[in-house]
Amino acid sequence: MWSDPRDAAYVYEMIQRISQIEGLVTDRDRDLFLADISLPHALALHFLVLGETANKLSASFKASFKAAVPEVEWKKIINLRHLIAHEYRQIDHAELWRLSLTKIPELKAALPPLPPPAEIF
């Protein structure tokens, strides 16, 4: 699975972004969160980076991972990044909130454990 050492770094980045997303929504009231001037935008930024990182994963990693865990929808993750980056006026922060509570835990559970550093380099 780790034929390209950059994939491990990208998965590490994805894990970091997932942690940031969880930190933004955990134990928060949805309506208060969405009414905040900056929190929804911070959430969108983490989704943007998550999608950008997913897009950088090697084709061989995505293919082997997709075979093992078909429920991860890479194309949707990457397309969400494009929407946030290029159609920012159309960002639905309530939908990002929903994804944070439904899809992010699924993605977190599906990501493979990282190899020890000695196996990456």
Image (spheres, rainbow, N blue to C red):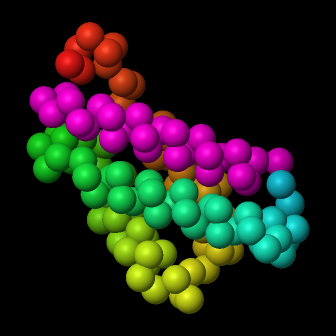
**Number of marks drawn:** 0
Q: Main secondary structure of the magenta part?
A: helix
Q: Can residue 78 be seen?
A: yes
Q: Position of residue 6 (x, y in %)?
A: 23, 36
Is 12 on the left-hand or right-hand side of 22? left
Instruction: Relative to 73, say whether 35 is above or below.
Output: below
Is 33 on the left-hand or right-hand side of 93? right
Q: Quadrant of the N terminus?
A: top left
Instruction: Relative to 25, say whether 112 is above or below.
Output: above
Q: Position of residue 107 (x, y in %)?
A: 46, 46
Q: Quadrant of residue 7?
A: top left
Q: Quadrant of the C terminus?
A: top left
Q: In this rendered view, identify the residue nearer to me: 14 or 63.
A: 14
Q: In this rendered view, identify the residue nearer to me: 59 or 87.
A: 87
Is 7 on the left-hand or right-hand side of 85? left
Any magenta on residue 44? no
Q: Position of residue 108 (x, y in %)?
A: 49, 40
Q: Which residues are magenta?
A: 1-27
Q: Can residue 73 be seen?
A: no
Residue at (45% x, 57% y) in the render: 49
Residue at (63% x, 61% y) in the render: 43
Residue at (13% x, 29% y) in the render: 3
Q: Quadrant of residue 8?
A: top left
Residue at far bottom of view:
89
Q: Position of residue 24 (x, y in %)?
A: 71, 52
Residue at (46% x, 86% y) in the render: 87
Q: In this rendered view, identify the residue nearer to me: 100 or 81.
A: 81
